[in-house]
Image (spheres, grey):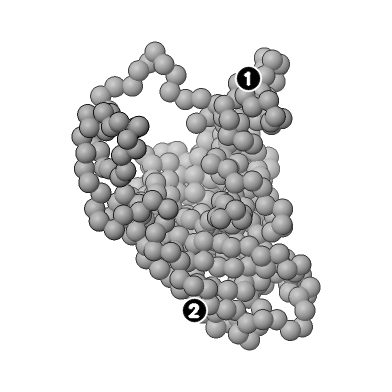
Amino acid sequence: MTCVALSDLHVGWDKQPVCVRLSRLWHYRGGLENGPVKVVHMVLLDAQGNHGYATVPTDILGAYIDMLHEGVVYEFSQFAVHPRPIILNPVDAPLMIKFTQFTVIKNCFHLNDEFPEWTFHLTPINELPPANDTPQNYIDVIGVITAISPMKAIRVPHTLSRVFKRHVLLSDDNGNELGITLWGERVVRFNGESVHFMGQTEPAVVIFVGATVFVNEGSKELSGGCACKWYVNHDIPDISVFRSRLPPSFPAIEHLPAPSRIVLQAQHDDVLPTSLLIHLMNINLYHKEAGTFRCNVTVTRVSHLKKWWATFCTGCHYMSKPAAMSLSQPDVYTCGRRSCSCTSATVR
């Protein structure tokens, strides 16, 4: 069967077999570290170096989750091709592959040496985009590791669950610094002690991929969840070029203080008190009653008379509406804040 290049895919259910290396793979569990896998995400590379994005949806996970392994070359066929999602794209390909119950997987181990292994789009540390609740793309960066914190188990607000957290500090070849916070299973996989030992005798140059931007005490940082991966001192041309620009002498990796024991500002040491909805609805806000409560409710219906979603500006997060020329340009919006000139919006 003749395979199609990832760049030649077109939207639809037509037979478009591809031969690709599974460059990156991660499991999305819906924010629950030990919860069931909801979606499998993959970054793909074909022999020509074209990259692509693929997912295995929840309803067919059981048939494929044990057949897919990072780094292996496969032939995929009988899948659906869709436009890529509007948020959290790991690559800039315009289309994505979505597995169906008919998808066929064939191992091609004999082709492993003929396919590239890595793909990323590096963003300079000093050019990170603004933090966004619904970021369009994941962020990839390169730098030399200057400090690492120990792994710490902390509690998630309003729950009894705990999650691992670790800070890593990077610097580019111009001295710009960037903090990265790793979460959950990513912390366990990042061998901080081994990297710290390495960084005592040679620069630990790393490429982090699949991160998102957030603001911590006024400064931009990166957050690394389930999609985050890293390549420390790998034989990658970008890492070799970066190392060549470093000065002959370099500071050894230092120890950062352990992360805070809480994830967010609001945190309680005891179990949250449970309150009834009728109590919460009758709180006198003028008395500013302090406290955080847990309230268990059952959604009995969703009104079909009122729209439960809205479009928000991707720049300032203010409500947006379709622009006057929306009939001819449906993706153009006008932000409700007059001082904002952003013309894109996302549904929330």
- Outermost residue on the front side: it is 287
**Horizontal side, residue 173 vs residue 181: left or right:** right
Check the image and report above or below for 64 versus 314. below
Query: Can you give x and y, in whole percent of width and height, for residue 16 in the image?
Result: 59, 39
Which residue bears the numbered disc 2?
A: 193
- Outermost residue on the bottom side: it is 201
Judge by depth and name the residue closer to the eye, 67 or 178.
178
- Location of the N terminus by quadrant is top right
At x 64%, y 27%, the residue is 337
Q: The residue under label 1 is which amino acid type?
A: Pro
Judge by depth and name the residue closer to the eye, 46 or 207.
207
Query: Can you give x and y, in whole percent of width and height, for residue 263 in the image?
Result: 42, 56
Label 2 Cα neighbours within 10 Å, binned few <14 / some 14-19 / many ≥20: few
Mark 2 to mark 1 CA distance (whole Å): 52 Å
Q: The residue under label 2 is which amino acid type?
A: Glu
Query: Can you give x and y, in whole percent of width and height, for residue 43 in the image?
Result: 57, 52
Which of the labelled discs sits on residue 87, or is there none? none
**Secondary structure found at label 1:** strand
* First reached walking from the N terminus: tag 2 or tag 1: 2
**Secondary structure found at label 2:** helix
Query: Can you give x and y, in whole percent of width and height, for residue 74 in the image?
Result: 54, 54
Label 1 Cα neighbours within 10 Å, binned few <14 / some 14-19 / many ≥20: some
Which residue bears the numbered disc 1?
A: 322
